[in-house]
């Protein structure tokens, strides 16, 4: 399970209460070897080794139900060409690099990624919760 970042919570609240407009963004899935935290200050994405965030579209996600949404399709990263470390969290961003952290969550179990490994999330494995 995961939750919304401070940034996204504020954007949505401002939108709902007429304090600002929010336009849906393209969502990019990222990996982290540390807990990003609600403000994103703890994120530690792999550097190099063919790592890049994965772009998703609205079709890649289920319809929200009971306060959560899941990935509807498999999300697969490129084959690692070097170690990415031990992945402990995923994060959602609004840009392919930099950008705003939207949500993040812990993996069910840490995932060591070495050269030659593929990181893949089957449908339903990434859960984002708004509570």
Image (cartoon, rainbow, N blue to C red):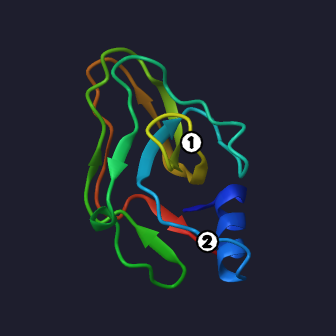
10 Å neighbourhood of mark 2: few (<14), some, or many (≥20)?
few
10 Å neighbourhood of mark 1: few (<14), some, or many (≥20)?
few
Q: Out of 23 and 100, give the one closest to the viewer.
A: 23
**Exactly how many numbered labels are in the figure?**
2
Chain-order first, disc 2 or disc 1: 2
Where in the figure is residue 65, as x and y percent of width and height?
Answer: 45, 83
The quarter of the displayed image where residue 116 is located: top left
Q: Is residue 108 left or right of residue 80?
A: right
The quarter of the displayed image where residue 40 is located: top right
Q: Is residue 64 left or right of residue 116?
A: right
Number of the label disc, if any, that sits on residue 99: 1
Q: Describe the element under mark 1 as helix, strand or loop.
A: loop
Where in the figure is residue 52, as x and y percent of width and height?
Answer: 38, 31
Where in the figure is residue 126, as x and y percent of width and height?
Answer: 42, 58
Q: Is residue 93 left or right of residue 75?
A: right
Q: Please name the residue shown 38% across and 26% down the image.
A: 51
Q: Out of 50 and 24, give the one closest to the viewer.
A: 24
Where in the figure is residue 5, as x and y percent of width and height?
Answer: 66, 57
Q: Is residue 102 left or right of residue 59?
A: right
- Residue linked to disc 2: 21
How far apart are the two marked residues, 2 and 1, measured between alpha carbons? Answer: 18 Å
């Amino acid at each position: 399970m995961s939750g919304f970042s401070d940034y996204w919570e504020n954007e949505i609240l401002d939108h709902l209460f007429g304090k600002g407009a929010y336009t849906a963004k393209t969502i990019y899935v990222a990996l982290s070897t540390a807990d990003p935290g609600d403000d994103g200050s703890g994120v530690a994405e792999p550097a190099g080794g063919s790592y890049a965030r994965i772009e998703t579209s609205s079709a890649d996600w289920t319809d929200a139900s009971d306060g959560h949404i899941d990935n509807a399709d498999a999300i697969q990263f490129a084959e690692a060409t070097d170690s990415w470390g031990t992945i402990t969290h995923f994060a959602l961003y609004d840009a392919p690099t930099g950008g705003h952290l939207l949500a993040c969550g812990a993996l069910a179990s840490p995932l060591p990624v070495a050269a030659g490994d593929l990181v893949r999330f089957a449908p339903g494995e990434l859960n984002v919760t708004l509570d």
